[in-house]
Amino acid sequence: MAGSSTDYIPHHLTHLKVGEGFWSLHVDTLIMTAILGIAFLWMFGSAARKASPGVPGKFQAFIELVVEFVDGQIKEVFHGDRSFLAPLALTIFILVIFMNTMDLIPIDIPGMVAGTAGAHYWRVLPTADANTTFAMSLTVLALVVLYSFKAKGAGGYMHELFGAPFGSNPLLWIPNFALNVVELLSKPVSLAMRLFGNMYAGELVFMLIALLGFAWAGALHDGNIFGFAIGFVGQILLTAAWAIFHVLIILLQAFIFMVLTIVYISMAHEHH
């Protein structure tokens, strides 16, 4: 824990990084994302290896339920070949849930564990790092462009960029292109900022609640047992209440990111 309430939040919002400025790498984000990615692969790989045609066990049934849920969402939006999009949507959904769930770990524990290894800072929530959310959303943008070329061909996609929405009059090519570029770039920005903003705000609320620890610790130091009891119980109740509500945010943000990815790629198949 940081030394005082003044530097507590800045301390917990600081990444363990190498390098400076634009070229700095957030080591904690990279390591946590890699660990969670491996956990995802192990979990679903284990379910696939143990799958049997008979009555499934609880673990297999749960995995099948998740896969069917994701596939059902894709069927409602995308009517093309799902052989690539279904694994992509499943990966996005589960991995974002895994990353978001790290916000439920008590805020001081990761820092204390990292401190035993000599690390002064360690942020455990990858989706509260804009680098993570923009990396995922830019990947989605690349797939949208790729699917646009695949579905419409180079000529068809260029015609769409320069000929819609105002028509293919050469005088309108520049306004058409400018509007289409703005629309295209707004997709990854909205994807990234929505996920980042919600998770960053959730993390910050947990930090603000944790600051009550300074209040009840100070009350105990001063011999104010009543103040200590109020602060201690208040912190526990507020943390539990926010954690329960935050579970909904964790699942909802993963669902929104997955669905919007499907919608954007589906829109890339449409001809204007």
Image (cartoon, rainbow, N blue to C red):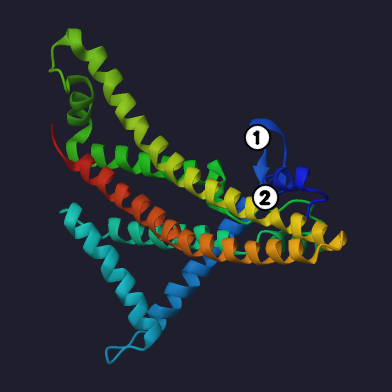
Q: Is residue 20 left or right of residue 50?
A: right
Q: Classify mark 2: helix, strand or loop.
A: helix
Residue situated in front as seen by the camera: 92 or 215: 215
- 164 vs 194, left or right, is left
Location of residue 47 (image quadrant): bottom left
Image-based side of 115 in relation to 15, left or right: right
Q: Position of residue 109 (x, y in %)?
A: 71, 64
On-image quarter of the C terminus: top left
The amino acid type found where label 2 is placed reads Val
Name which residue type carries label 1: Trp
Q: Seen from this angle, which residue lies furthest bottom? A: 54
- x then y, percent, for residue 154: 23, 31
Label 1 secondary element: helix
> Dot 1 corresponds to which residue?
23
Residue located 36% across and 89% down the image = 57
Badge 2 crowding class, 10 Å Cα cut-off, few under 14, some 14 to 19, many 20 or more, is some
Residue 84 appearing in the image: no
Question: Residue 133's spot in the image, x, y percent?
Answer: 48, 45
Instruction: Tell me: 229 left or right of 59.
Output: right
The residue at which mark 2 appears reads as 27
Q: At 86% from the left edge and 63% from the top edge, which residue is drawn?
A: 223
